[in-house]
Image (cartoon, rainbow, N blue to C red):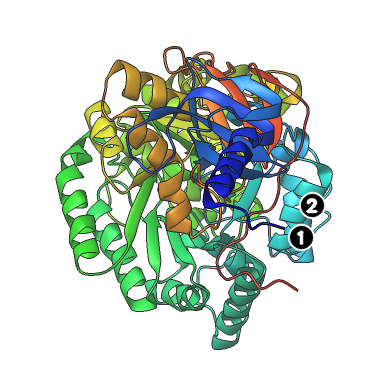
Amino acid sequence: MKPTSLSTVFILLLLFVGCSQPQNFDILIKNGEIVDGSGNPSYTGAVGINADTIAAVGDLGDATGSTEIDASGLVVAPGFINMLSWATETLIEDGRSMADIKQGVTLEVFGEGWSMGPLNEAMKKEEQESQGDIQYDIEWNSLNEYLEYLTNKGISPNVASFVGATTLRINKIGFEDRAPTPQELDSMKLMVKQAMEEGALGVGSSLIYAPAFYSSTEELIELCKVAAEHDGMYISHMRSEGSRLLESLDELIRIADEAGIRAEIYHLKQSGKENWDKFDDVVAKVDSANAAGLHITADMYNYVAGATGLDASMPPWVQEGGYDKWSERLQDPEIRKKVKEEMTTPTDEWESLMQAAGDPSKILLVGFKNDTLKHYTGKTLKEVAEIRGVSPEETAMDLVVQDGSRVGTIYFLMSEDNVKKQIALPWMSFGSDAGSPATEGVFLKSSTHPRAYGNFARLLGKYVRDEQVISLEEAVHKLSKLPATNLKIKKRGSLTEGNYADIVLFNPKTIIDKATFEDPHQYAEGMQHVFVNGTHVLKEGEHTGNMPGRVVRGPGYIEK
């Protein structure tokens, strides 16, 4: 047999290449504007998905898909990361995560001071008794058990969490205003270690509120040292966002430095008109810390109002011991007199959001537990005080007692100019600081902050398209790869081959928030498709009913 000539081999190779079949994927998203999360310029291309994974990105030629989506006119981007989510209860009620899925959120990150574990029996009993519109049995103890409870139940987005420093303190110390004993601190550190090995992202604190307010800097450093050993992050609602903002930032930087840990500022803001000019000093401190080798970042929501409770208008000492003790004290005439005086007297000893708002007309009441008080929903504290014929301070105290809760409250605190300047900061990502409700059922029993329905769409519509504060590519980077990198989450945050297929498709010309302070229960518009772990969750703007959400674990996770 004659040996094959070189020319024959060449012809055979050409025939082989010519006859090779185009790639075929489970799902092919084609003709879209690819914004991959890196911050690099967008381009027209395609994304191929196999199972739960991005199999290919770019110019995929004649590729086909068992399911094909023509993304002409749409942006194709990584799923968005909600750095501060309070969907801990709304996902129990409704796993679809309607408000956030309709904005492209594929990962909810919990743990602002309070986390859903570790819980002891007393904590579980108290949490059960304090439930409002959403009622559920607490079937878990550890934070990991809670996250797995959600995914076993069925949820559309992925979930992750910090372990809460407040939760650790209540677990071992209760609501007392004192330092932990050495034994108690050791127990708290052991709980951090367990949580980190089970996948927690780090330690979260909320130092404006009792009992977190009672924690010393040294206590937090000790907890953070354990998280740092597992490559975790410290993330904090700092002691002050107003009169002592700069001092509180110094504390966060000190904790990061002495614990050897990355740190993030929750919902960075300058609260109260007299503090709006502190923006440049805040940026200078963060930039200086980063230049010195630390890793300091921040997140924010895109509104001039924050939301919390009436507890943020009262001194921490009156809240020591938990809600029952707080309520009891507020019914003592002498204590009420003292509380009212402190509520109206400027101080650097604690953070008063009532004083930061400047006027009770800028305090909106949105969340009542007691049905007999729900008719006040949507009214300002000033309006309710006038209806009742007593001072705003007395009204606030009375409502806390009568409602059996801290009463959900919106405070108008910030400058729109500062909001825009913060959005442009290179180390800024985004969090709603809210649940993920739906425009139906139990969620309509109470009002909410519009950020629950609009935070992410507002960035892309108002601040990117309409006001051009930052580019589309930069916005997507801040919603995806930046937070994923900060958290050291693997295989998420960018349209990269081998990453999990958390992908969103939206119309850049129409995406916008619709929720308002007057009428917050309105979905954002413009998000067309959302994939979570390769599963179609939002299709042509409508929820498919699919629940593919998983637990996303931090860098210290040890598989058992």
- Can residue 86 be seen in this snapshot? no
Kindly indicate the quadrant of the structure image that contains residue 352.
top left
Q: Is residue 34 left or right of residue 369?
A: left
Q: Is residue 111 left or right of residue 155?
A: left
Q: CA distance from mark 2 to mark 1?
A: 6 Å
Other residues around mark 2 within 10 Å, as few (<14) / some (14–19) / many (≥20) = some
Q: Tag on residue 149?
A: 2
Residue positioned 42% across, 40% down in the render: 37
Query: Which kind of residue does numbered mark 2 sit on?
Result: Tyr
- Please state the horizontal and vertical placement of residue 368, each as a whole percent of the image: 64, 30
Other residues around mark 1 within 10 Å, as few (<14) / some (14–19) / many (≥20) = some
Identity of the residue furthest to the front in this view: 2
- Assign the C terminus to one quadrant of the image: bottom right
Q: Tag on residue 145?
A: 1
Count of residue discs: 2
- Can residue 388 be seen in this snapshot? yes
Residue positioned 42% across, 56% down in the render: 486
Query: Which kind of residue does numbered mark 1 sit on?
Result: Glu
Give the camera-side residue of 324 and 479.
Answer: 479
Kindly indicate the quadrant of the structure image that contains residue 267.
top left
Asked if disc 2 and disc 1 are in contact, CB closer than 8 Å, the reply is yes
- Please state the horizontal and vertical placement of residue 317, each as a whole percent of the image: 47, 58
SS class, disc 2: helix
- Please state the horizontal and vertical placement of residue 366, each as a whole percent of the image: 56, 26
Give the camera-side residue of 92 and 476.
Answer: 476
Give the camera-side residue of 495 and 133.
Answer: 495
SS class, disc 1: helix
- Assign the N terminus to one quadrant of the image: bottom right
Q: Tag on residue 167?
A: none
Asked if 558 appears above or below 514 in the picture, the reply is: below
Asked if 219 appears above or below 158 in the picture, the reply is: below
Give the camera-side residue of 16 and 82.
Answer: 16
